[in-house]
Image (cartoon, rainbow, N blue to C red):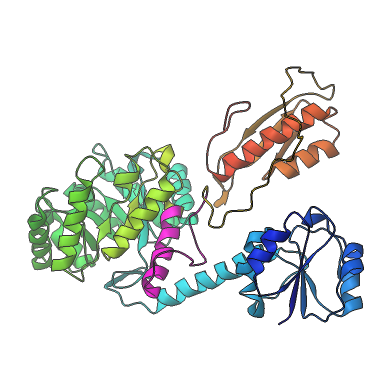
Amino acid sequence: MKILVVTGKLAGDTVKKSVKDEADVLVLDVEVAAFITPALLRRFLPDKKYDLILVPGLASGDFSGFERELNTPIRLGPKHAVDLGFVLSFADNLNFSTKVPACELLAEKRRRSVFDGVIELENNSTIQLTLKGVRLGGNSRMKVMAEIVDAGHLSRSELTDKILYFVERGADIIDLGISLDTSANDVRAAVKTAKSTTHVPLSIDTLDPELINTALDSGIDIVLSLNSENISEVKDNVAMKSVASVIIPDCVEDLESLFNNIELARNSGIMNIIADPVLEPIGHGMAESINRYYEFRKRDTTTPLFFGAGNVTELLDADSIGINAMLSGIAMELDASILFTPEFSHKAHNSVFELKTASMMMLLSRERGSAPKDLGLDMLVIKEKRRREFSRVPENATEAKSSEKWHLDPAGCFKIDISDDEMRNGKLSTGKIVARHENKSITGQTAREVIDTIIGLGLVSRLDHAAYLGRELMKAELALKFKRSYSQDDKF
């Protein structure tokens, strides 16, 4: 395929470096590539036939007329010159668009392909057990278990909303965390509410045999957790209902007791077993606990493993996304089956989604026998995979200075904040920017749509006020993107 890539003078060298010999490059007499117009392209287009002409992804002109005249497709390339080489490698299999930049088009196509691949691998996986259609063990995808802390003391609506939120964010299993002062009636009500809310498997999280039996009689799918102290009191009920059971050691450091408890459970008729060697937090024996997982897996290669990622993320003041990615990689190498998190603290918010994404990445990585990179799916939020070209400071540039003056806008002031994600009528409603004015309140997902609406309604009359609103609204948009709180005029 003969391709012509069109660009401006500023990006010319970067484009040539990125394209190499994959296409011809035409550098037009315009500084910024996004300002290329059909008239400018018509004036300098070489007298040569091409199968495809790629203009910059941010170009806003209408090239359709010139395309018909040439009888050659004129399509949008990527938004950034550095991505051209990557995009051109897919040129034979990608239908470029006149509306969507090639980088976004390719990202979405690869993303769909990734999800299709994950589904196919999951459907063809070999497994140890199935719970309500959820496949566990073997080479299936690691499943995310989301714990609802103190589920027995939540109101029906609170519990329902938390369950729906976790399922929406990707939880494969819902765990009902039960505190020490929870009654049997509370457990019964919680399980009933959970069963009426979702069809995903449900687990009960308590060591109390009375509460375990109550949950079993109410239709729970997984018991979390059993050891030598409670197995004898629940074994008949668990065995009769063929419920899956997470087995833990009597003492965290004693791996041998885990094997003994598994044998005790099996001798008691409990067959659907998930082992938990217990992942410890950093500073409390994390390395040693990972070694216990490793030793367990060497001695037992088939029993599904429970991996408590939340034990680490909740007790570490660092962004959870990288921690969850790394923990998922460790869990994958240990052939773990369940990734557990409670999303209890604010810093661990969104961990279910992060672990679900990581579980898919690790499935693809294992299948390809490669590191978890270049999969078409990633967990990059702040860092970037391909760095954009930096600009150079022009000579004789004016050094910027902030103004100390402040003038009240006659059109009025705004109070800006953001709303949180919340469940509404059984569906997850994502947070929004909220701009409150004395005459109007405006909500939106992006800074652009909010400021455009403010301007359209005539609610801003000063340039300095419009610039201020743009800065604050962009901070609010970033806060939504990164799942952070926001306070007007505070540093982000």
Q: Residue at x 56, y 57 (%)?
A: 386
Q: Which residues are magenta?
A: 354-381
Q: Is residue 293 magenta?
A: no
Q: Position of residue 468 (x, y in %)?
A: 73, 29
Left or right, 303 with respect to 20, comes to left
Q: Is residue 378 magenta?
A: yes
Left or right, 53 with respect to 489, comes to right
Q: Residue at x 51, y 69 (%)?
A: 115
Q: Position of residue 439 (x, y in %)?
A: 80, 28
Query: Is residue 425 among what the camera can see?
Result: no
Q: Residue at x 64, y 65 (%)?
A: 18
| Quadrant of the rendering where the C terminus is positioned | top right
Q: Nearer the viewer, residue 73 or 174?
A: 73
Q: Position of residue 213 (x, y in %)?
A: 21, 54
Left or right, 262 with respect to 329, comes to left
Left or right, 143 with respect to 393, comes to left
Q: Position of residue 194 (x, y in %)?
A: 40, 53
Q: Nearer the viewer, residue 262 or 61?
A: 61
Q: Nearer the viewer, residue 417 or 475?
A: 475
Q: Residue at x 81, y 22 (%)?
A: 409
Q: Is residue 157 above or below residue 94?
A: above
Q: Is residue 291 above or below residue 424?
A: below
Among the 4 quarters of the image, the one containing residue 73? bottom right
Query: Is residue 392 among what the camera can see?
Result: yes
